[in-house]
Amino acid sequence: MKKIIAGVLFTISCVSCVNLESEMYDTINLDMFPKTESDAEALVTSAAYSPFRSNFYDGIFTNAADGIQIMGDMTTDLGYCQWTDSWWPDMLNFNFTVNSERIGTPYIYVRDISKMTLTIDRIKDIPMDDNLKARLTAELRCGRGWLGYLLYDWFGPIPVASLEQLQNPMVDEVVPRLSKEKMVEFIETELKEAAKVLPANYGSADPDYGRFTAGLAYTVLMKLYMHEGRWADAEACAREVMKPEYGYGLVLTSYKDIFTLENERNKEIIWACQSDRSGNMALWQAHVLPSVYPTKNPNIQKWSGYRMPWAFYHTFEPGDERLEVLVGDFVGTDGIRYNESNPETVLWGGALPIKYGEDPDAVGEASQIDWIVYRYADVLTSLAEVIVRKDNAISEEAVSLLNEVRNRAGLTKYELSDFMSVQDFLDKLLLERGHEFWFEGLRRSDLIRHGKYIEYAKRYKGSVTAVDYMVVMPLPQSAINEGKGVVIQNEGY
């Protein structure tokens, strides 16, 4: 799976590269392709998986400033960047406008939902094993639902073209944004239908590891229901993912072991962007490490950008093992000790969110360590939240679920008596999730759900521009221009 995506994308884009006759290479000749089972597999791999990559500067999960996880966390209290590129001020200071660079970048992936829709139709009559066809179709539906959720969470409802509209591209028709209700229905339907067919999970040695699973579909569905405040539905999804047949569990050795090359494909990972030296490599350490930070591999590129602000760093409890990969005090290769008291240009923006281990083969910016998107600890802490919200009461189960994550971090477990109220539990859980999932792209959605996104922008980011409507991002101006009055901008922008 790691090598398939890049190869398929290259193959589809470069067919007949040596033919000097004038041909259109950005369209598919349906009289020639797809016709066979292998054609279908190649087309589905390209259409369903190409958006969900962390491939250098490409893909919705890129570690660079276009990545939806990076941008989301940078707008919150746990993210900062020391660089002075033109796009960082709006993102960091919570000044979102239609002209803000990078903020509107994820909108380009609206087109990928259309590609998946067309691909479902293109493979439906290809002679192949029925079970394979069902699985490939389910992968496309999972991709549509997941991408729909990511864009809905970021922008609010988006335009989703029907098959009939896509099959008549010469008709001058602008597709309007779906209503909120129709957007949720679309995401929910796609994920539920996909989950009926997809395998629960793939084993770490399975050649299909990295393809979509029912575990992923239910995890995204859980997030949709939490977004909508449908707590009972979210609970059902979380409990589904916790069933033994899915095979998930916490990595109990230590927090840092989740994110190393040696422990790739561990049981905590629900889905990760596949990386190896042949392609689709992530850029995390290059974006974080300063040049003076000591590494075993001297060939790792170090650009000294991403930081965790000191204010959030100080919210961690003493002895929290997650601090082993969140560095606020170290002796550099120059012999100087860097910390908050002596940051110089190295730590002036905050502590180093190193998190991922070294790639011993790295030469330059790229790492072959898989980039994790969702993991089981997210499901456990989400379940703790939803059962408390559903019943408006703190239960022993909710406390126990929270403690599973705290125990792994080497922290004292909570007792039921440690919480003064439901709100106190939710506040402590929100902070625990911040300590657990920094720079995994969950903080923005968490703060919005807890009603603290705008409040924290003012309190911790010092924003003087943050206003309530900024819980969704503006659509890029190009989308409004092309929408000809049919595609309407989000309120306030």
Image (spheres, grey):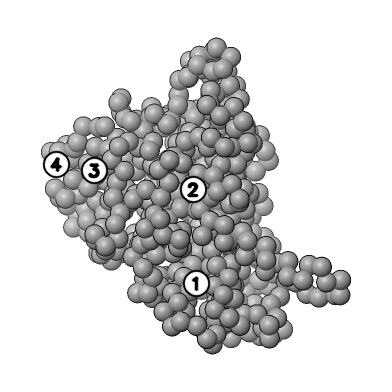
Q: Disc 1 designates what residue?
A: 140
Residues 406 and 212: in front is 212
- Residue pictured at 35% horizontal, 74% vertical: 196
Answer few, some or many: residues within 10 Å of disc 1's Cα (few below 14, many 20 plus, some between 14 and 19). many
| C-alpha distance separating marks 1 and 3 | 34 Å
Q: Amino acid at mark 3?
A: Glu
Label 1: which secondary element: helix
Judge depth for marks 2 and 3 and give the one in front: 2
Q: Disc 2 designates what residue?
A: 370
Judge depth for marks 2 and 1 and give the one in front: 2
Given the current orientation, which residue lies at the most extreme top position?
335
Q: Position of residue 412 (x, y in %)?
A: 21, 32
Residue 404 numbered tag: 3
Q: The C terminus lies in which quarter of the figure?
A: bottom right
User: Where is 18 relative to 365, above or below?
Assistant: below
Q: Amino acid at mark 2?
A: Asp
Residues 418 and 383: in front is 383
Mark 4 vs 3, N-terminal side = 3
